[in-house]
Amino acid sequence: MSRTILAAKSDLKPAQHPKRKSKQRSPWLVDLQYRVEYIALKGLIGFVRLFPLDVGVALSGKAWRKIAPYQRRHKRALANLKLAYPDKSDQERETIALAMWENLGRVMAETMQLDRIMAQPHRVEFASQVVFERYRNKIGPAIGVSLHMGNWELAIWPLTMAGGEPAAVYRTVKNPYVDQLLRDQRKDLYPGGLFGKGRVEGSQAEGQKTARVIMDYVRRGGRLGMVCDLYDRQGIPVPFFGHDARSFAIPGMIARRVGARIWMARCLRVGNKTQFKIELKELKVPRTKNKADDIRVITAAMQAQYEVWVREAPEQWMWSNRRWS
């Protein structure tokens, strides 16, 4: 209800309800806050890296398992689990949620040490080694799509190992110092660079601008990584765990238009250590006379594969994210 209508209902003139001006902090105070946040994060990274890789990762996982259930996102995780698994008991869903938080704690510590992981390639194996060897030199323009499972940061590794210098789309952080730090941590995984898409869910115009930039990149022969299992306000509603969920259609749009392949990748954690298995699967791209139908088919097939993967290891998927409207 607008301010004018409220004023009319109380027999007051709009002028008697002056619009409040939002207080804006001075630039130096904002910059000071950003620098303090950056220093705190650097300190945390330094602390985690004091320990051997597996020890620091395990400590982070245990801490998240203890602390996260007291946060608001735990309720969202349980609500999502109830929607996806209505037949499971509350205790079963709670068990999955706790295991999820522990995995996320491990991912956080691993993200701070991606260089160490990449220096120990034995920690990552390809479940589809034959497929990888067959296509590594023939991939051409490609879009690698993954989901927030296991350690999704490493899902791009096959494209990186293939020598194609893949790039990726990531959600930028408002703090420019922290944002640059996160970019630096990922530079070896994404030698082709990172395309930022904004800190908050953008408008349709912003989404179209991002789509044009990355489409040009793939059209020129680039290989692009995207994580596409979140709710997209501008996306196409397709089934996910029996409920319509607005889903990212950009991979299908780009592949359909520029003739690129779509490779799906899942990086699954093996046991409770920093050990992973990456599974690759090519997603067929239909090219009929109806472009809109083709994009819908691709988007639905992508989410259907995500559901299969999540059902196989629900404790490794990020249930705390918004997925259904």
Image (cartoon, rainbow, N blue to C red):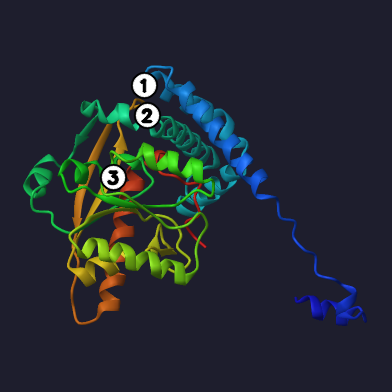
Taking 43 as reference, is 263 above or below it? below
Q: Earlier in the sequence, mark 1 or mark 3?
A: 1
**241 relative to 131 in the view: left or right:** right
Q: Which mark is residue 88?
A: none
* Residue 223 on image: x %, y %: 22, 54
What type is the residue that disc 1 sits on?
Answer: Leu
**312 relative to 4 in the view: left or right:** left
Task: Please give the residue where the numbered disc 2 appears in the rendered image.
Answer: 113
Whether residue 156 is visible here, answered yes or no, is: yes
* Residue 318 on image: x %, y %: 44, 44
What type is the residue that disc 2 sits on?
Answer: Gln
* Residue 319 on image: x %, y %: 47, 46
Q: Quadrant of the N terminus?
A: bottom right
Could you tell me which residue is drawn at 55 percent across and 31 percent down? Answer: 39
Could you tell me which residue is drawn at 50 percent across and 48 percent down? Answer: 173
Could you tell me which residue is drawn at 33 percent across and 68 percent down? Answer: 212
Could you tell me which residue is drawn at 18 percent across and 74 percent down? Answer: 287
Q: Which mark is residue 190?
A: 3
**137 relative to 54 in the view: left or right:** left
Mark 2: few/some/many CA within 10 Å (<14, 14-19, 20+): some
> Do tag 3 and tag 2 residues touch (Cβ < 8 Å)?
no
Task: Please give the residue where the numbered disc 1 appears in the rendered image.
Answer: 53
> Do tag 2 and tag 1 residues touch (Cβ < 8 Å)?
yes
Q: Nearer the viewer, residue 256 or 71?
A: 256
Q: Earlier in the sequence, mark 3 or mark 2?
A: 2
Mark 2 or 1, closer to the camera: 2
Label 3, label 2: how far apart the Cα atoms are? 15 Å
Whether residue 251 is visible here, answered yes or no, is: no
Residue furthest out toward the right = 11
**212 relative to 69 in the view: left or right:** left
